[in-house]
Image (cartoon, rainbow, N blue to C red):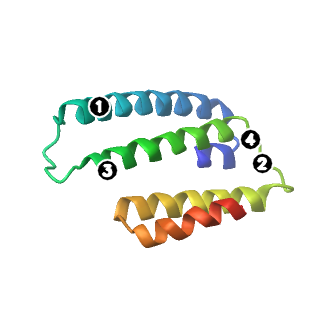
């Protein structure tokens, strides 16, 4: 979605946002089922309820970022701000995927400054 905004491909942004909302809904449904029953369709036996909630939370925030990007148009006045948001988003994603909790904690406070 960041690429769509940078390249001013607004027509491509809406379908991406719709797909993101569908993904979020499916993910939340699976996580609720897992938390309620303890059964999750996965071969990953290390998947814990805490991780389920982490996935739900990050998908929620990705959806919120999508809502912001959907209505955003870049010009020179906000280009630097946009780049900070994108970098923070990519850093958070990286910290989440690598389970780097120290970095995630630091990034949590950077978002407030942005």
Q: Are marks 1 and 3 in contact (CB under 8 Å)?
A: no
N-term mark: 1 or 3: 1
Separation (CA) of disc 4 from disc 1:
31 Å
Residue 93 x/y as whole percent: 46, 57
- Crowding near the residue tagged with mark 1, few <14, some 14–19, many ≥20 C-alpha atoms within 10 Å: some
Separation (CA) of disc 2 from disc 3:
37 Å
User: In percent of the image, x 54 and y 70: which residue is there?
Assistant: 106
- Given residues 92 and 33, the one toward you in this image is 33
User: In percent of the image, x 61 and y 65: which residue is there?
Assistant: 109
Check residue 74 in the rendering and tell me which mark sits there, or answer none: 2
Q: Relative to residue 33, is residue 64 drawn left or right?
A: right
Q: Specify the quadrant of the image occupied by residue 87.
A: bottom right
> For mark 1, what is the residue?
30
Figure check: 84 above or below 16: below
> For mark 4, what is the residue?
72
Q: Residue furthest right?
A: 77
User: In percent of the image, x 72 and y 35: which residue is there?
Assistant: 71
Q: Are marks 2 and 4 in contact (CB under 8 Å)?
A: yes
Q: Relative to residue 86, is residue 99 drawn left or right?
A: left
| Secondary element at image label 1 | helix
> For mark 3, what is the residue?
50
- Given residues 53 and 9, the one toward you in this image is 53
């Amino acid at each position: 979605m960041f690429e769509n905004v940078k390249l001013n491909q607004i027509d491509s942004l809406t379908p991406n946002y719709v797909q993101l909302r569908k993904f979020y809904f499916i993910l939340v449904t699976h996580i609720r089922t897992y938390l309620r029953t303890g059964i999750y369709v996965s071969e990953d036996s290390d998947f814990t309820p805490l991780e389920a909630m982490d996935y739900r939370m990050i998908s929620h925030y990705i959806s919120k970022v999508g809502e912001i990007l959907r209505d955003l148009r870049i010009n020179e006045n906000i280009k630097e701000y946009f780049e900070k948001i994108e970098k923070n988003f990519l850093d958070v994603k990286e910290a989440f995927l690598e389970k780097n909790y120290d970095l995630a904690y630091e990034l949590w406070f950077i978002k407030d400054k942005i």
